[in-house]
Amino acid sequence: MLVSELIPLIEAKNLTPTISTERPVTCGYVCDLLSWVMSHGDSGMAWVTVQTHMNVVAVAVLSEMACIILPENIDMEEESLAKAVDEDMVVLTSPLSAYEICGRMAARDIPAHN
């Protein structure tokens, strides 16, 4: 599945519309502890987190993730969004809970990260 196909699935809004969403999502992950995500992040991962500061973008870029997903209509600070655009990292926000987002991804056969 591509990020562009994930957007309607999780009813998301793209907070970085200038960045291409034609990148594959290889797995899903939900975690808010950045050090844990740094050690478990993978290329192509769709990462669900409530964190919105600049370090989230850095961790996603470092792991070459497909996108960052903020649940429950959480917004990201403008400074962090500017960094995401500079680093070519897609940031989405969804009205769904993290649980619902992951459930929908699992139902579409997007595997959980091992």
Image (cartoon, rainbow, N blue to C red):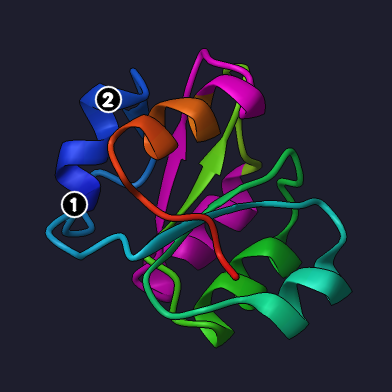
List x then y, in percent, for residue 106: 42, 38
Furthest residue in direction top, as rendered: 95
Q: Amino acid at mark 2?
A: Leu
| Residue drawn 87% across the image and 60% down it | 33
89 part of magenta stretch: yes
Helix, strand or loop status at disc 2? helix
| Badge 1 density bin: few <14, some 14–19, many ≥20, Cα 10 Å | some
Question: Quick check: can you spot residue 51?
Answer: yes
Q: Residue at x 42, y 76 (%)?
A: 87
Q: Which residue is mark 1?
A: 1
Q: From the viewer's perspective, is residue 53 above or below residue 102?
A: below
Crowding near the residue tagged with mark 2, few <14, some 14–19, many ≥20 C-alpha atoms within 10 Å = some
| In-front residue for pair 62/6 | 6
Indicate yes or no whether the magenta region holds residue 80.
Answer: yes
Task: Say which residue appears at 76% left-offset and 52% top-offset.
Answer: 31
Name the disc covering residue 60, or none: none
Query: What type is the residue that disc 1 sits on?
Result: Met
The image position of residue 4, as x and y in percent, is 16, 43
Left or right: 42 with respect to 51? left
Q: Residue 34 at x, y = what percent?
A: 82, 67
As drawn, is 75 to the left or to the right of 17? right
**Which range is magenta?**
78-100
Residue at 50% from the left image edge and 27% from the top image edge: 103
Q: Are marks 1 and 2 in contact (CB under 8 Å)?
A: yes
Q: Is residue 2 above or below residue 88?
A: above
The answer to whether residue 74 shows anywhere in this view is no
Residue 48: horizontal and vertical position, in percent?
60, 45
- The residue that disc 2 covers is 9
Relative height, residue 19 to residue 40 (above, below): above
